[in-house]
Amino acid sequence: MRKFALVFSSLVLAMAACGSDATPDATAGESTTGVEDTPVAVDGEDLYKRTVLVSNGGCITCHSLTPDTVLVGPSLAEIGRIAAERVPGTTGRDYLLQSIVNPDAFVVAGFEPGRMPTNWAEGLSDDEIAAIVDYMMSLGAE
């Protein structure tokens, strides 16, 4: 019986230490008007680097941060610097936001449409998406 208790305790501790890739809530609470009462810091780099995000492979699973390294989608090295150059008349921030919430709106030459999941806006809050965009805008920024 003592051996069972030790094994069980070890298992519980191991499970607790593993944590979860579940997406954190972006806000502590929302008012009835939809305006956030108490914002909670959202770390775009943390969200970007998760291997599982909204039941999909996370950003880092398919997009390398190393120049010219293609995993599934295009490398996002320096994307903060080059995003505004991708679509004339579109800001870098808008380009990245649109690329997350409607991935087939702008498909980089040499890549197929339909490869990137389309449910990010359903599974991530506006604050989480904004945090990811902020992080990507910092990549290659001077």
Image (cartoon, rainbow, N blue to C red):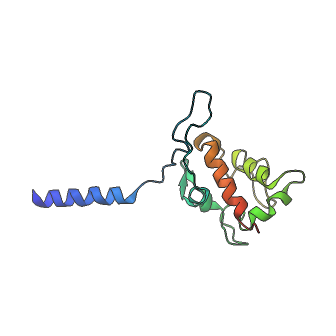
**Front residue of 96 and 29:** 29
From the viewer's perspective, tell me whether residue 14 is left or right of residue 125: left
**Front residue of 57 and 96:** 96
Q: Quadrant of residue 57?
A: bottom right
Q: Residue at x 59, y 37 (%)?
A: 36
Quarter of the figure that contains the C terminus: bottom right
Image coordinates for residue 41, horizontal then vertical, percent: 56, 51
Q: Residue at x 57, y 61 (%)?
A: 49
**Front residue of 16 and 114:** 16
Image coordinates for residue 93, horizontal then vertical, percent: 77, 53
Q: Is residue 48 above or below residue 102?
A: below
Q: Is residue 21 above or below residue 123?
A: below
Q: Residue at x 74, y 53 (%)?
A: 96
Image coordinates for residue 22, horizontal then vertical, percent: 48, 49
Which residue of the protein is positioned furthest toward the front in this rendering?
37
Q: Is residue 72 above or below residue 128?
A: below
Q: Quadrant of residue 58?
A: bottom right
Quarter of the figure that contains the N terminus: bottom left
Which residue of the protein is positioned furthest toward the left in this rendering?
1
Image coordinates for residue 29, horizontal then vertical, percent: 52, 37
Q: Quadrant of residue 85?
A: bottom right
Which residue of the protein is positioned furthest toward the right in this rendering?
88
**Front residue of 109 and 43:** 43
From the viewer's perspective, tell me whether residue 67 is left or right of residue 56: right
Which residue of the protein is positioned furthest toward the top in this rendering?
32
Q: Is residue 25 above or below residue 91?
A: above
Q: Residue at x 52, y 48 (%)?
A: 23
